[in-house]
Image: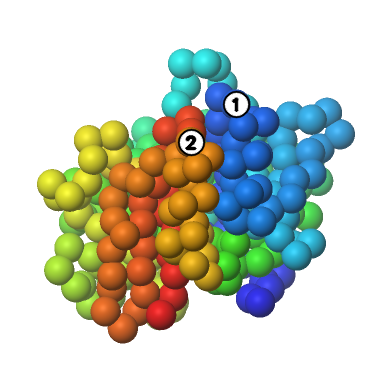
Amino acid sequence: MAVITKYRPGMPCWVDLSTVNVDESVGFYGQIFGWTIEFDEIGGYGQFYRRDKSVAGIGSTMGPESPTLWNIYIATDDAAKSVELAREAGANIVAEPMEITGEGTVAVFQDPTGAYVGVWQADQHEGAELINEPGSVNLFELVTNDVEEAKSFYGKVFGWTPGIPAKQYTPMLSEGSPVAGMLGIDDRFPAEIPPRWLVYFGTANLDATIDQALGLGGRVLLGPVDVPGTGRFAVFGDPMNAPFAAWQAA
């Protein structure tokens, strides 16, 4: 179990699902990843838990026409400053910094390649309490049609630096440690996956996860793909068409 209590600036720290059908999404992810759910007092936002540790959030989309998708949030110690850096680097600001009483401050923007990303300035809520094990987030990957532009943008805003690339994949580092990856879009990717952040969740048995997802109304969009010496993954669409991925370590 990888329990985490503090995120330094520049580390992805939280994910949540914006969905047109909260109940169906809760049932789907609860079954394939073994999550339980707790909603806030007014019932508008929920947190998924595994082994009594928070792993992700869930809430309704702004309207029925809005797509269901997974959002990622990167830790910052100054949300307003991060937004200004993003603006200067060419981002479209979607939501200016907004304080969530007692929890933290959030802002959202669209990077120059078209992917949405949030920043999170923590107060009481640091982010996911459990990472890097089955049923929790294992990897954050930017799928983009312009890796060079993305590397420049995230470097300016979050101080990320590129690691050694492998084919179309470039690891991104924060203070020398890997925090995310970037993957150039090619013809392997379905058209319904435009530039976006793709969240990978760990699984102990990818084949079983595939069977469960298909049985619950999900689809396999890519894979399963073997990464020699590292593991296997598949990219899915959930019943509301939100892409996500599952990773089984070798």
The residue pinned by badge 1 equals 21
Classify residue 191 as left or right of residue 50: left
State the residue lying farthest toward the top: 64
Amino acid type, residue under disc 1 in the picture? Asn
Residue at figure coordinates x 44%, y 75% from the top left: 249
Q: Mark on residue 232?
A: none
Q: Quadrant of the N terminus?
A: bottom right
Q: Position of residue 166 (x, y in %)?
A: 19, 73
Identify the secondary structure beneath mark 1: loop
Q: Mark on residue 217?
A: 2
Residue at figure coordinates x 62%, y 32% from the top left: 24
Classify 166 as above or below 192.
below
Q: Position of residue 2 (x, y in %)?
A: 64, 76
Classify 39 as above or below 250.
above
Residue at figure coordinates x 50%, y 42% from the top left: 215
Q: Crowdedness of circle 1 by 10 Å Cα count: few (<14), some, many (20+)? A: some
Place residue 49 in its image quadrant.
Answer: bottom right
